[in-house]
Image (cartoon, rainbow, N blue to C red):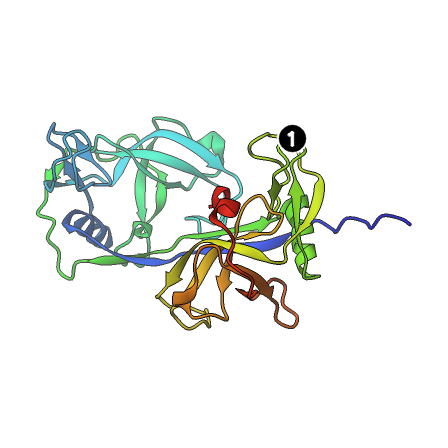
Amino acid sequence: MTAASPPEILRAPLVVEFPFTRSLGPVQSAFLTGLREGVVLGVTTADGKVMVPPVEYDPVTAEEIRDLVEVGTTGTVTTWAWNGSPRPNQPLDTPFAWVLVRLDGADTAILHALDAPGPEAVSTGMRVRVRWAAERTGAITDIACFEPAGDGEAQGEAAPHSGEFSDAVTGIVAEARLDYSYSPGRAQTAYIAGLSEQKTIGERCPSCHKVYVPPRGACPTCGVATTDRVEVGPAGTVTTYCIVNIKAKNLDIEVPYVYAHIALDGAGLALHGRIGGIPYDQVRMGLRVEPVWTEGGRYPDHYRPTGEPDADYDVYKELI
């Protein structure tokens, strides 16, 4: 009899996205509103340094600072790196340089893009100026990018500014997004393939003999590869749990419900699972449970009581 071939290593695109709305204090509100109006503002620290972009607390004394000043829209490149392959939503869609620019009148540098024909056209110490966006809304993107400037273009001192504008920007939406290709690797590919057959497959460390579920491909304690596959469960023991009272978006489960750590029989650590088939206030440590699969489901929908007596604490205490 020939051995079954290992499953093909899985890969899938994954997007992690977390846009959130945040309010602005008086300093950040003035800075972003100023950009909308074509003005760059900084803040003066206790020792007289001008910070651009401005911060709300002195990095040395931790005291609140609100003394705003207007700085120039020209400045000097302090360091740079060439970006030959711009990613989506970056400032420019053609190759450009990331630069730190110390604007005239400022003591710190601001990070932005420099529109240049190639890396040979960029150097530390070169003079640049702000290129404003055609439409400005009160965001860092109101500075479309920097562009080369002549050596004789304006240099000046920071001038006090009230920070007062009409229709000030008071909040922003910060969008965080990460696109990447994820592969669970050899060990978890086998685990996922086992779940499709309603089996839970772990891997045993050849040194300490702990069975990891889900498997990790190596024992984090001993540092050796885990290649011996072991089927565990299907029943297990609730080691710890929590009662969920807040309904999650896009999750069709009525609250309250119980989410638990479940040590499957034969496993060396507990995994997560929802408990069903029992009132939430009757779930307890030591409760014996088994998986419930829905038709066509790729993993257990939830775990329900088996009807067995509760496990003794000494049996599962090392798995809490």
Q: Is residue 302 above or below residue 140?
A: below
Q: Give the residue type at disc 1.
A: Ser
255 left or right of 56 in image: right
Q: Is residue 109 above or below residue 253?
A: above
View extreme (right): residue: 1
- Residue drawn at the location 37% of the way across and 26% of the way down: 124
Q: Is residue 65 visible?
A: yes
- Residue drawn at the location 63% of the way across and 55% of the way down: 233
- Residue drawn at the location 43% of the way across and 70% of the way down: 279
Residue 174 locus on image (x, y percent): 33, 54
- Residue drawn at the location 17% of the way across and 42% of the way down: 56
Q: Which residue is mark 1?
A: 207
Q: Is residue 248 visible?
A: no
- Is residue 46 or residue 224 the one in the foreground? 224
Residue 148 locus on image (x, y percent): 36, 37
111 left or right of 104 in image: right
Residue 238 locus on image (x, y percent): 49, 55
Which of the 4 quarters of the picture holds residue 241?
bottom left
